[in-house]
Image: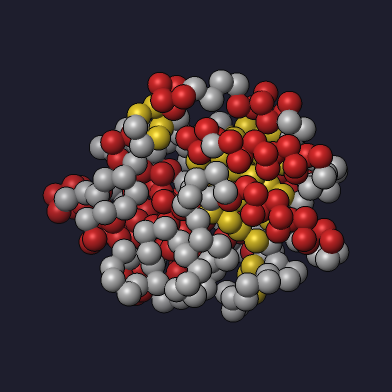
Amino acid sequence: MLIENVEKTTTVEELKKIASQVRRDIVRMVHCCSSGHPGGSLGCADYLVALYFREMKHNTQFNMDGISEDLFFLSNGHISPLWYSVLSRAGYFPASELGTFRKLNSRLQGHPATEEHLPGIRIASGSLGQGLSVAVGAAQAKKLNKDNRLVYVLMGDGEQQEGQVWEALMYAAHHKVDNIIAAVDYNGQQIDGPCDKVMSLGNLKAKYESFGWRVLECAEGNKMEVVTETIQKAKSLTGQGQPIAILLKTEMGYGVDYMMGSHKWHGAAPNDEQLAKALAQLEETLGDY
């Protein structure tokens, strides 16, 4: 199935309902195997749902080349529960397969990998700092091939502490790779605590701009209306000689009150009681797998 121009048919309210189901999938997946990363997955659900169900042109009859399609790369691969849920709900593979998350011989490993041949996955990711380099290369290849579609990549804010990110930023601006939209999940938390305490990012917007990027700030990254507007604005700025970045202000664990805003849920699974409490806060809209 080719998903194209879906913004004409998928309303913001429908996107919100999809995001609610995706959040249910996330907490159930992580609970089932007693491991995984729910915090960032919950926080970025609105952004990824907006991309796959409204903003990107993509084909669920997956091929690695992605010719004439928009491409997405998940650099912070530890939030794989989110990506797997979105891919399945978009039609890449049956939602029932979500129940195999992190199990032996599953295609849904803790960090996405290509050896399992899971539709939608083009690179192994989760070794932080690498995704932007890959996305810039894919975007440059599209320009060389005169393919006018866009490349999207999502990174974590703690990931910005990796030096390879800054090499890629410099490269993309120098080569005017203006068909890429790079988003940073700016929730202020990483596995060991708040980013400001582990290693402050300083003025991230100013740093990106000093490297030659056009930067948009999405102050409400968990408000679907604002997320879709920001993506559309970013798309409108492509093709003008500068790569585009979105600083996406989200809240870790969004949608589950006891997880929200705490780095402790970066990589911890809910127990049975906590799962029940989480599910009570998240509407079932598409049917649980």
Q: Is residue 44 left or right of residue 255?
A: right
Q: Is residue 76 left or right of residue 30?
A: right
Which residue is depicted at the point 26% across and 45% down? 268
Which residue is depicted at the point 64% across and 54% down? 134
Question: Does the image show residue 113?
Answer: yes
Q: Is residue 207 left or right of residue 192?
A: right
Q: Is residue 44 left or right of residue 109?
A: right
Which residue is depicted at the point 41% across and 25% down? 198
Whether 266 is drawn above or below 208: the answer is: below
Question: Does the image show residue 17?
Answer: no
Image label count? 0
- Quadrant (top left/top right/bottom left/bottom right) for the N terminus: bottom right
- In the image, residue 42 lies at what x, y percent? 39, 47
Where residue 170 sits, quadrant-wise, is top right
Which residue is depicted at the point 53% across and 54% down? 74
Where residue 139 sits, quadrant-wise, is bottom right
- Quadrant (top left/top right/bottom left/bottom right) for the C terminus: bottom left
Q: Is 52 in front, or is 70?
A: 70
- In the image, residue 230 lies at what x, y percent? 65, 41
- In the image, residue 275 lies at what x, y percent? 21, 52
- In the image, residue 273 lies at what x, y percent? 14, 49
Whether 119 is drawn above or below 187: the answer is: below
Q: Is 127 in front, or is 111?
A: 127
